[in-house]
Amino acid sequence: MNMDDSSASYIHMVHHLIEECLIFNMSKEECMEALSKHASIKPVITSTVWNELEKENKEFFEAYTRNRDQRATDMEKRQRIQFRVNAYMREKGNQD
């Protein structure tokens, strides 16, 4: 196996690991951190491969980002509602 083959195979592995990050709904930054920590892949490598995937799959990544943003908004709403419910329950408990 020559250097080009091993480089291509390394890039392919990083590509596959990024796809795993996408399944777990990670951001680019979260993926860079996870691959650095768990697979010893330099963040610059992950970032470069991610950017290439984004170029090749523009529509997918636009939808992915929108979906992530919407999930974050939904989670914030749920947290605010839970906070209000907790405050109400504490207040109600103090009145009894």
Image (spheres, rainbow, N blue to C red):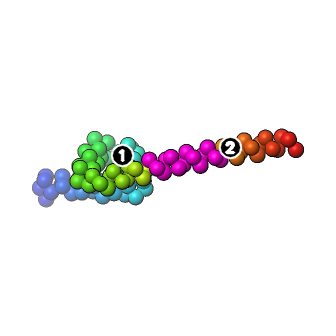
Q: Nearer the viewer, residue 21 or 94?
A: 94
Position of 27 compared to 1: left or right?
Answer: right
The verdict on residue 94 being magenta is no
Residue 35 picture location, percent across and down: 36, 48
Q: Secondary structure at mark 1?
A: helix
Which badge, 2 or 1, is on the more N-terminal residue?
1
Task: Using the rendered view, name the quadrant where residue 43 is placed.
Answer: top left
Task: Using the rendered view, name the quadrant where residue 80 is placed.
Answer: top right
Residue 59 picture location, percent across and down: 29, 54
Residue depicted at 83% across the width and 40% down the height? 94
Q: Which residues are magenta?
A: 69-82
Residue depicted at 44% across the width and 47% down the height? 69
Q: Secondary structure at mark 2?
A: helix
Residue depicted at 32% across the width and 56% down the height? 60
Q: Nearer the viewer, residue 35 or 89?
A: 89
Query: Is residue 38 visible in the rendered structure shown here?
Result: no
Q: Nearer the viewer, residue 1 or 36?
A: 36
Name the residue at the right extreme: 96
Query: Is residue 24 visible in the rendered structure shown here?
Result: yes
Name the image quarter holding the N terminus: bottom left
Q: Which residue is disc 1 drawn over?
A: 28
Q: Main secondary structure of the magenta part?
A: helix
Position of 21 compared to 52: left or right?
Answer: right
Residue depicted at 57% across the width and 46% down the height? 77
Q: CA distance from mark 2 to mark 1?
A: 32 Å
Position of 49 compared to 71: left or right?
Answer: left
The type of residue carrying mark 1 is Lys
Q: What is the crowding at mark 2: few (fewer than 14 residues within 10 Å), some, or many (at least 20)? A: few
Name the image quarter holding the C terminus: top right
Q: Which residue is disc 2 drawn over?
A: 84
The type of residue carrying mark 2 is Arg
